[in-house]
Image (spheres, helix red, strand yellow):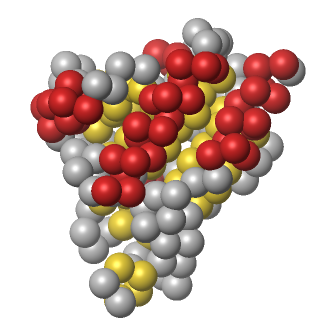
């Protein structure tokens, strides 16, 4: 049975139910399955094994804040090199993600859709039950699948602290 919690986030002025636990630095990151832009259901951590992962959770690529965040991480990924993978997850359908990335020129970020099972949302404490979309959060996972950075945004419109996230990823690379 999934954990359900209230009092963490409001949407349109109403308290919403968050499904799943909040994770903490030092915990082992749980494997989760999501669909890539080719509609293949893949193990997200397994498909990036041995890499440092920056994983962002978004409401939808079509919103201004999510658009800005994804573009920023695409730019940052260029400088981070081949040992870092940036994964951005939303409930957007795979073809929507593929079209958005194509029109936005996003080629360094891997977009994944959690729309089928909400596996990521439930395991990482992100699923907003009433609307079936994800709350905004950012995670950095090291090469050994340990969480080294976790930040759940207090509001859906808040962006992550980009310098902190990049610093955590660089530190994970050197360990």
**On screen, residue 164 above or below 1:** above
Q: Which residue is drawn at 27% across and 74% down?
A: 130
**On screen, residue 25 above or below 65:** above
Question: Which one is in front, 146 or 102?
Answer: 102
**On screen, residue 61 above or below 159:** above
Count of marks placed on residues: 0
**Which residue lies most toward the bottom here?**
13
Q: Which residue is drawn at 54% across and 24% down?
A: 77
Q: Residue at x 47, y 16 (%)?
A: 47
| Residue 156 locus on image (x, y percent) | 43, 67
| Residue 161 locus on image (x, y percent) | 64, 53
Is 37 on the left-hand or right-hand side of 46?
left
Q: In which quarter of the image is residue 85?
A: top right
Q: Which residue is drawn at 32% across and 69% down?
A: 129
| Residue 82 locus on image (x, y percent) | 58, 9
Q: In which quarter of the image is residue 37?
A: top left
Residue 28 showing in the rendered view? no
């Amino acid at each position: 049975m999934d954990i359900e919690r209230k009092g963490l986030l409001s949407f349109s002025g109403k308290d919403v139910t968050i499904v799943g636990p909040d994770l903490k630095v030092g915990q082992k990151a749980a494997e989760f399955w999501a669909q890539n832009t080719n509609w293949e259901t893949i193990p997200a951590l397994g498909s990036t094994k041995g890499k440092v992962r920056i994983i962002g959770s978004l409401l939808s690529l079509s919103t201004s804040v999510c658009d800005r965040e994804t573009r920023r991480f695409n730019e940052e990924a260029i400088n981070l090199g081949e040992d870092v993978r940036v994964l951005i997850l939303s409930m957007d359908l795979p073809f929507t993600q593929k079209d958005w990335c194509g029109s936005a020129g996003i080629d360094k970020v891997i977009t994944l859709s959690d729309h089928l099972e909400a596996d990521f949302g439930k395991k990482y404490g992100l699923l907003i039950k009433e609307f079936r979309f994800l709350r905004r959060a950012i995670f950095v996972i090291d090469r050994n699948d340990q969480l080294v950075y976790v930040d759940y945004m207090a509001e859906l419109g808040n962006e992550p602290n980009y310098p902190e996230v990049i610093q955590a990823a660089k530190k994970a690379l050197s360990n």
